[in-house]
Image (cartoon, coloured by chain):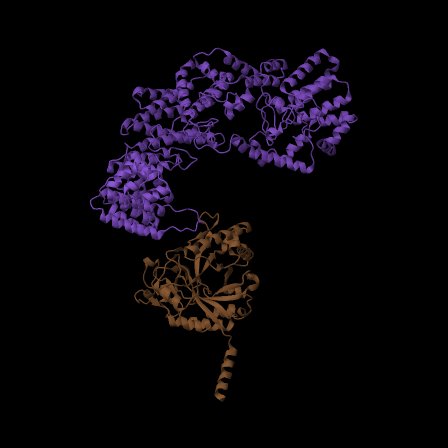
Amino acid sequence: MILNMTTCKKLFIGFSTFFTVFFAEIAINLACGGEVDPYDYYINYFHSDVSGDEYSPFFFTQLSFLYGDKDTHSESDINSEEWAKYLQVKKEDVEKAMYRSNDATNLILSKLDQQPISSLPDSLQQNTFIQALGKNKKAAQYFSFAKSCEPLANSSSDYWNPAPRDTAGMISAAKEALDLVSSSHGDAFIKLRYAYQSARMYHYAAQYQECRNVYDKLIKTNKTSSAVKGWSMALYAGATRRLGMRSESAYLFSKVFESNPERRILAYRNYYNISPSTDSVLRFAKNNTERATIWAIEGFGNPAKDLKSLEEVYKNDPKSPINGALLVREINKLEGNILNGSSNYYYYNSPNNADSVKRVNLKHLTLVKNFALKLAGEKKYSQPELGTLTAAYLSWMENKGAEASSYLSKLDFPKLPERLKDQYRITDLLIKADQIKKGSSFNPNDLLPGLKWLDQKRFEENKPKPGQTYDDWGGYNKAFSLSARNLYQDVLAPAYLKMGDTARAAMAMVKGDIRSSNLKNKDLFSNMGSTTIGYWQEALSPTTLLSIEKYRTTPPQDNLDGLLAGSIRQLNQDDFYELLGTSYLRTHHYKNALAWFQKINPKHQYFSASNWYEGDEGRLYPNAFIETIRDYPKQNGSKTGGLNKKTFAMEMLRLQKLVTSDPKNAAANYYKMANALYQTGYFGNSWGLISYSWSSYDNVVPPKYDYEKDYKQALTARRLYLKARILTTDQNLKAKCTFMLAKCAQKMIIPGKYPDYLYTYLNGKITYKDYLDANLANPYYKEFSAKYAKTPFYQIAQGECSYFREFINRN
Amino acid sequence: MRLPILLTLICALFSGCKTEKKPHPTFYYWKTVYSQNKTEQQYLEKMQSRSLYVRMMDIDLSPDGQQAIPISPITFKESVPQQVNIIPVVYIVNNILNVTDSTALKTLASKIAVFVQAKVQQAGKKDYQELQIDCDWTKTTKDRYFYFLEQLKKLPQLRNKEITATLRLHQVKNIESSGIPPVKKVMLMCYNMGNLRKYGPQNSILDQAEMDLYLKDHLKNYPLALDVALPLFKWAVIFRNKQYAGISKRLQPNQLQDKNMFKKLEQPLLYQLLVDLPQAGLKKNDIVRWEHITTKQLLQTADFLSAYLPSTEFNLTFYHLDEQLLNDFKYDDLQKVIHRF
């Protein structure tokens, strides 16, 4: 809170506090990196892939259209396989020639049927597929034709590219393909492919009716079983759409979705591009499988609670793996709506924690649980155990641990498929972890095997890949890492905190962050996530840190404490000792602080404040032992003459000793200490001595941690100014103390309770005027005016502090 | 001996009443695919057309509304005949000028130049001499449009080419508010002059009363050189409950003569549909205003223009070169129109 105030500055303060609060919320949430990770924005324990990978592009994430945009099957793989079988050659050779050849090679291949194999380059001659084509004229002819269609099909999407789509060429190619169909007697394989090329060329040339005609006459009736039929169906569906028959088109795309996993995403995108009403598409469905597929697409595309789609799929096709995929989606949605924790980006700020919303979500949970039990009981689905496991997990979510355990006990663990086994283990861990509470007879060491197993799984996920140079902190493909983190930080740590065990809570936080068994950087804070860093740097008292030090230095034991302590033990101790020393600076126990600073390697780089906008250029050195009237501009120290944590501690210790050993000068020394402690506030130049961070909205957020007594409220400084004032006889010094007391008192006026400030401000409960009045009603101003108006300091203060002048003018 | 002198005097008198005009007949080519059509070729040859105005593309907003892009650019299935010069035409939707700032207009000019050059080469031509910009600019877009034309002129690849613009009737009359485009020559579009969307028997394509209103007092004084464009086209304007409902592209003119389908109304050009016609997108009781051009109308227009058009030598461009349209006009009819000037 700056002191110099003029009328327009009042307005500025009003606006700036308004805006800082308004944006503070967003700023805090985005503080650690900007965009929200679509794979890590809610608490997840029930992994998306528990029921299988078949529908992995459609796993749940609200923040992205698809979970992944690669199909589960490769088109080139499938086609190469078909050709390999047809010609009895190697699949890889087909793939190389068909899909991996460059432009120059493609040119040669487009004329393959017109030249002998011996004239080809070596690499092609040795390709078994090319060799086979050399012996099979019809196949070679088709292959060359297909290659010649490629330049027509691959046209540019740049609007300003003047080269036009060669629609005339396409139509001509389409017609040629039809002729070649006729001449391919008896070879259904080749005939189908010519027909496909024809339909394709017509489609790209916008000849949609012709495209459909080709499909109806030549492809629908072709007896070959081939993926090409599905690709042709996709073209047919697209042509149908362009001709205005949108619902039918969506239905046709749903058929492609079902039959061709290599074009499933394409079909899905087209379906949603059309955005038909479900009923209008269902009208075309001829059997249960088709109905199930349509409902599957609807379900996969629905980010909101949706049991209807799942029930319809189950009704029509209970065996289908889609049931599992949709069920897991519903579980994930419930996780996002019910589970609280620091990793839940939206929960933290959303009204989801309101009772009414909680009830709605729990109601849906019950419905999903009932469905899961039905799935398990009826045994129509291929993995009925998934249902029981779901029921167990959902029970855990409802805090019904006993019920959850009973569901788990119904499962025959050894017989479970691997992924269900993993999910069983996680659920079991969660149930057990909930039992860590005061008065519980539960032995926390029972968690050990499960936690060790979880470590294994997440270390595996984070094994650096060959050539990888960066640490991947994202959420994609890191389900075990995220679940482990969530378990440690959102279940274990809060459980320990509830029991008052801050040391174990702190260690659990770190344990949650360490994803890999092979740490490149062993610095303490480099291995913590932002929430953990905040907690460690702000919340830990000397007592807690001493406990952690004990765990850290105790020989490792094969128990839970050993596991938790192990995470700290592997990290460098200097940062830890600096934190310990700093925690003593905060409690003003300077001797203890120095003791820990002595243990630090002399080469260690202590934390130092810096101007965030200037980076390394903007290092701010403390200059604590100065007198100030105004807080701004801050009078920082110089690099060489500035203080550091050690020298600050030494000077404060010295002054502390002096006030008892030199009572005559006690007042002056108290005054000095008070000034120094004042400067360790966010408004001072030495906050870096007791805080690891500084923010421009610190004046708005009410204090939460112990050290904020100094950092935000100047309470110790105030106490010492009072002491100095009582002890001195010097009126001028009394005046100075009184003035500083006024400044200390002012720090107590925090505009409302964040984040309510914005609302109270708008509702007029704490108006800006009230806030100003509170400032001007500072009791020490009255005293200052009344008692010390004749002191030299009074004149100086009045001259420098316009806020005080304002006070005088008012009175 | 007296008769020849008398005749010469009479000829001199007549020639004094009217300045000798020399129109160069040519056509607009306004289709998105260029291919050589026998009838169309013949007309070009017979008329000895030296140039052909070929639409290259429209410029309008991309589907996402983010930038100005070429819409439906022409593709050349065949080359434009060797003896015919190509004059590329770019149609700019007026709204583009509302949403594009000067920096972007500068870039647009450059992109258009590059695009047109490529298209001209696709037409089988090495180069071209004149680029025509077609835009129905308004008072509010005038400054931007003129700026755009200036930028075109400044481009290195267009410096040795002539930039011309189209001119509509209202821009002749309202020369103050419309301004004079920074070009040396404009093409006066003598069509689409009436109110298309107003119900009534007027022919919105070509209407003498409109021409009188806009041009009679103003054309003579227009300060730029003028070419002329005349219409050959026709269309079916649909009205439903006397409200404009569009132009039907799937209505055949011979259907209008079918008394089971249409009833000719008393007012000229108007036909009432007696049945539903779904293939043409029409409903019973729709009114069709069959706007078309007759040779008589063209001759009348020629007479008018020859009296008021200040140009002596100019391009007389028919809109547009299409076999279906040409079949409505005998070659001799068009020659009559040309010679009327």
Return the x and y of residue A182 as percentages of the image width and height.
23, 49
Of residues A240 and B283, the one nearer the viewer is A240
Location of the C terminus of chain A (image quadrant): top right
Of residues A439 and B44, the one nearer the viewer is B44
**Farthest bottom residue in view:** B1
In the displayed structure image, the side of residue A616 where residue A272 appears, left or right? left
Q: How many labels sit on residues?
A: 0
**Farthest front residue in view:** A119
Return the x and y of residue A523 as percentages of the image width and height.
52, 21
Q: Which chain shows up in purple? A: A
* Residue A128 visible in rendering: yes
Return the x and y of residue A705 as percentages of the image width and height.
57, 22
In the displayed structure image, the side of residue A782 where residue B293 appears, left or right? left
> Above or below — where is B236 with respect to A710?
below
Q: Which chain shows up in brown? A: B
Return the x and y of residue A29 as percentages of the image width and height.
52, 31
* Residue A287 visible in rendering: no
Write down the quadrant of residue A98 in the picture: top left
